[in-house]
Amino acid sequence: MTGPLQDPIATDALIIGAGPAGLFQVFELGLLEISAHVVDALPYAGGQCIETYPDKPIYDIPGIMACTGRELTERLVRQMSPFAPTLHLSQEVSSIQTQDDGRFKVETSRGTAFLAKTIFVAAGIGAFQPKRLRVEGIEALEDEQLFYRATDAFKSQAAGRHVLVIGGDDAAVDWAVRLADDTAGDNPQRPASVTLMHRRDVFQGPADSLDRMRQLVADGALQLVIGQLTGFDAAQGQLTAVHLVDPEGAVTQLRADSLLVLQGVSPRLGPVADWGLALERKQVVVDTEKFSTSTPGIFAVGDINTYPGKKKLILSSFHECALAAFGAAKIIFPDRQTPLQYTTTSPRLHRMLGVHAPAASE
């Protein structure tokens, strides 16, 4: 929902997307003294790494034998921290307009406005949207008793409630386990009950998480239901129960007053398609010199772009970010040469990064 527009935030660069490409773009821009703000539809940084494989290993990041999507995100956030970017999360860019002075006025779904000299589209394969329940009228419960993303804040909202977690992948299993563990002892934030529901008795996740889930079910701390939600009951606008149909077609009723739906996410190109950029098969066309789009001043890096020989790899996006940063520097500092400096030897970069520069004799 669009809120009241604020006074525009002036920035050298606005990065759309806080996945690996967007986070590394902050770092590469920072090395060239270009400040940045970052917008992302998710409530946290990490993009696809966090949404689809937070705990699965990645083996092709240079210099790192293996790291999970979560670990890669944490490393990239630490790496960009010297440049103190501002992250504007849980909002999508809704419009981009070129101003008379060459800057871009950008507005988001939450009423945040920017005046940016350059824009970097790092939206991956699109803005990730949760897969929603297809039950008539249930959308009225969103953000009150129906949630599509789990956060620590949700845990406090679940206190004393009969929680139904819907889903069968890592996130659903993990949160069902976390909530069920909270029902033990004297935890004041514990739910009254926790149920995990999936359409079939097949769950994905780390072995230790699945083992813990089964143990909690055996101990009676977690209920396991196989079926699909078909309806719900509400009294005075408050959810009281849900209707389920099992694999044999039998319909049952389950007490529930808090729903956590973690059925995965799907990418949506969304408003990118309306920004006037040249597209090819729902991807943004760029050059390979500076990864500029068909609109001067707008760059695209990562899985959202396309060019001859494009490979959708995280390591490829890092290369794109470096060249895009130099392309932006020519726009932001038109009267200044931007020499290539190395982080191994440049005292200026060492000061910016806050690292110890080794003496010549070391």
Image (spheres, rainbow, N blue to C red):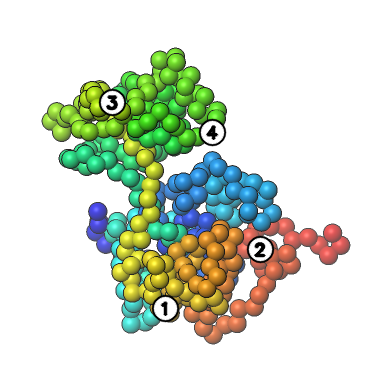
43 on left or right of 212: left
* Point 64% across, 46% down: residue: 66
Nearest to the eye among marks 1 and 4: give it.
4
Badge 2 or badge 4: first in the primary sequence? 4
The residue nearer to you, when weighing 73 against 355, is 73
- Amino acid found under the numbered disc labelled 2: Arg
Image height check: is 349 above or below 354? below
Q: Which residue is mark 1?
A: 294
Nearest to the eye among marks 2 and 3: give it.
3
Q: Tell me the CA gap for discs 2 and 3.
A: 66 Å
* Point 47% across, 22% down: residue: 214
Quadrant in the rendering for residue 304? bottom left
48 on left or right of 164: right
Tell me the element at label 1: loop
- Amino acid found under the numbered disc labelled 1: Ser
247 on left or right of 279: left
Tell me the element at label 4: loop
Using the image, tell me which numbered label, if any, was put on residue 206: 4
Nearest to the eye among marks 3 and 4: give it.
3
Q: Tell me the CA gap for discs 1 and 4.
A: 44 Å
> Are the two marked residues, 2 and 3, in contact with CB atoms closer than 8 angstroms?
no
Q: Which residue is mark 2?
A: 351
Badge 1 or badge 4: first in the primary sequence? 4
Q: Tell me the CA gap for discs 2 and 4.
A: 42 Å
